[in-house]
Amino acid sequence: MDLPAVPSALLDALKAAAIEAGLPRLALVGGVVRDLLLHQRHGRPWQGVPDLDWVVEGSAARLAEVLLNQCGPERVTAVQHHDQFGTVALKLDGVPLDLATARQEHYPAPGDNPVVQPGSLAADLVRRDFTINAMALELISGALIDPHDGQSDLAAGHLQFLHPGSVSDDPTRVIRAARYGARLGMDLGSAARRQVGETVAAWPWAWQTGDAPQAAPPALASRLRMELERLLDHEPWPVALDLLVSWQAMALVDPGLQRDAERTRRLRWGKRLGLPLMSALLAAASDPGAVARRLQIPGQQLQWLERLPALQSWLASDPLPLQSSPDAWTTALEGGGWPPQTVALMVTLRPAAWRPLLRWWGRWRHLQSPQSARQLIAEGWQPGPTLGEELRRRRGVLLDQGR
């Protein structure tokens, strides 16, 4: 086994420890195997080595113990045992390694978290999402293990799920497919497209969670949110979102977003205004607050999205004339009590009044009266409502002077 930038002494130490521990198999798994094949066979630039994930047939804790005995604490550092998961994280010669006991899993119901128990390397690979991620490099024998023909899909540029129930077991794999597709320049194969289409056609499922009918199972909702956050934070998101729409899969988040032709422009505006991309994405949903609650969007972002329909309604039913003064717009917006980020989200939706909303967000809301209350009191004003009105008046004069 030859891994660029990974010292051969590290691999030799792992192999010796595996043999000493009597392990049937120790295999490198995950994206590093896929990326190594893309580099060696298809000329993709090598992006460097992330954390190295190893699957152990046997006990990961036993392997870590032997490794520490053979190499000593100078080479083996930062050892962390996670007994409930059968994993050990450590550093060998300063390189992070994750050792995991081979596992198998099944889903008790669609969308639930899987039930996991010890298994073989073959069973562990079945747990993966795509054929291109279900390959392994076996350290002891040096063999490439590819039970699902991931090499062929890698060469063809196809993302294929591992089995016919992959998407129905976990629909978040569709979001993951868009992430990999954007990053690697790949698209769904024909069988994978059929799976996605069947799942979307049955969506939303007849969920019942406690007293909240039609609420997504919490495990599924949180995984959808996390996959979307990874997509928006770490991938070429314009490409990834286009892939989801081309697969008719944005309906997994909200049907309104499937019809949203302005998503790329809106998210770029959101980024320009310093908004979280998740909030900018959900702003165009059929009911932004409801979708945010279903996805368990945290605190403040949920509040921004929940207030958005009221601001939309005000702009549609009782808008100020577009030529109204900065003071008039500022008074109206601040009198409505909308969070500033809700106003900024409205800017990304480009209503007729988007320009004064943008000016309020970027400039007008930051301007205050040129004199403070203390200064006015020193000039002879008495504390009370009249003083407040005078501060607002002077602020208004300053706002209109700067128009």
Image (cartoon, rainbow, N blue to C red):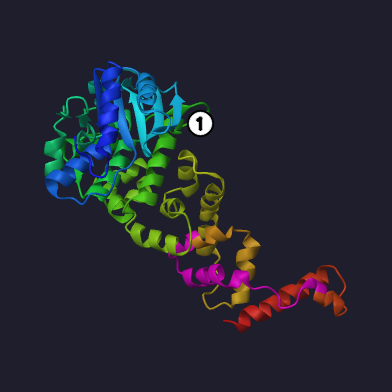
Residue 12 sits in which quadrant? top left
Depth check: 260 or 368 in front? Answer: 368
The outermost residue toward the bottom is 401
Q: Secondary structure at mark 1?
A: strand
Query: Was residue 369 drawn as part of the magenta stretch in this picture?
Result: yes
- Above or below — where is 168 with respect to 242? above
Residue 127 visible in the displayed image: no
The amino acid type found where label 1 is placed reads: Ala
Count numbered badges in the picture.
1
Q: Is residue 159 left or right of residue 328?
A: left
Specify start and end residues of the magenta stretch as a single range: 345-374
Depth check: 46 or 126 in front? Answer: 46
Instruction: Read off the residue under disc 1.
Output: 212
Residue 211 visible in the displayed image: yes
Residue 87 sits in which quadrant? top left
Whole-percent x and y of residue 65? 39, 21
Type of secondary structure dominating the magenta stretch: helix
Q: Residue at x 76, y 73 (%)?
A: 372
Whole-percent x and y of residue 167? 28, 32
Query: Was residue 288 drawn as part of the magenta stretch in this picture?
Result: no
Q: Residue at x 27, y 49 (%)?
A: 47
Residue 86 sits in which quadrant? top left
Q: Residue at x 32, y 58 (%)?
A: 261
Quadrant of the frame with the N terminus: top left
